[in-house]
Amino acid sequence: MKPCQRWIAALLVAAACVPAAQANDRPFQVARTAVFDDDDQGWSIESWAQRLGSVRGLSIEPEYTFGNGFSIQTELSRTADRRERETGHEAEVEFKQVFNDIVRDGWGWGLSAALAATRTRDTDGTQPSIGIKLPLTLPLGARGSYLHLDVGVDKARGERRAFTGAVAIEHELAQRTSVFAELAREGTTTFAQIGARHWLRREKLALDLSLQQQRAAGTRGAGVIVGIGWYDL
């Protein structure tokens, strides 16, 4: 069994054995469209730094929830490859609609549409892309433990369509600490992470730390992600 598969298996065992609590916003990378249970009008801001081999990245993601399951979020990212001496920039706007009440029904589903623009030294100008995803959230055993499924398709200008899929799990281990894992595939890239979230201020300020592994085009890299999120601003 590969390391990332052992991580996922270990977390699934832990989730089955520990009492659950209600979860809130999600610290995922690919499954960021996971259905959430916040229907109040307000802002949230997430930011994270990551290292993957020789690549360093920094992202910030403000989001506004209008209520009735509709939200808009913007992500701005910058990456730098120290070995290849290359930098990249990306901007994305995502529109998401959740179609049912996850608190009432215990599960939720929705639709996400995103417009993005990427710029690197190798590309001639800015490369736009569009993506559509269908997120589904299901309860896992006791209340507060969730399984997230996310499928979709992305299309960049001048390239073929790339199908995406992600599965993620989250579970609270203690009053302010939860664990999470994610396994995803975007086109020919496979991504996995496992980590923990600690609430510095319950449902207001969270700190995330995770280990990641990525494989693409015959290459493999590992690294770490550190994130912080402010909610209900």
Image (spheres, helix red, strand yellow):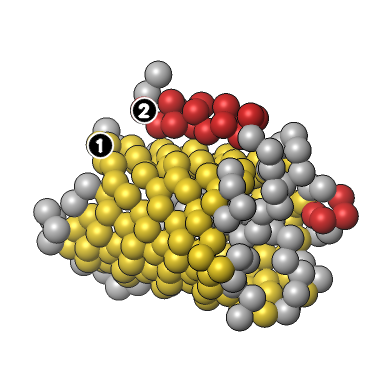
Assess disc 2: are there few (<14), some (14-19) or many (≥20) residues with their C-alpha within 10 Å of its C-alpha.
few
Foreground of the two, 35 or 13: 13
Q: Amino acid at mark 2?
A: Pro
Assess disc 1: are there few (<14), some (14-19) or many (≥20) residues with their C-alpha within 10 Å of its C-alpha.
few
- 103 left or right of 118 in image: right
**Residue at the spot of label 1:** 219
Decide: is 16 above or below 34: above
- Which numbered circle lies on residue 197? none
- 60 left or right of 232 in image: left
Circle 2 SS class: helix
Location of residue 220 (image quadrant)? top left
**Residue at the spot of label 2:** 3
Decide: is 118 above or below 135: below
Q: Amino acid at mark 1?
A: Thr
Location of residue 190 (image quadrant)? top left
Residue 216 percent across, percent down from the top left: 32, 39
Can residue 219 be seen here? The reply is yes
Q: Quarter of the image containing the N terminus?
A: top left
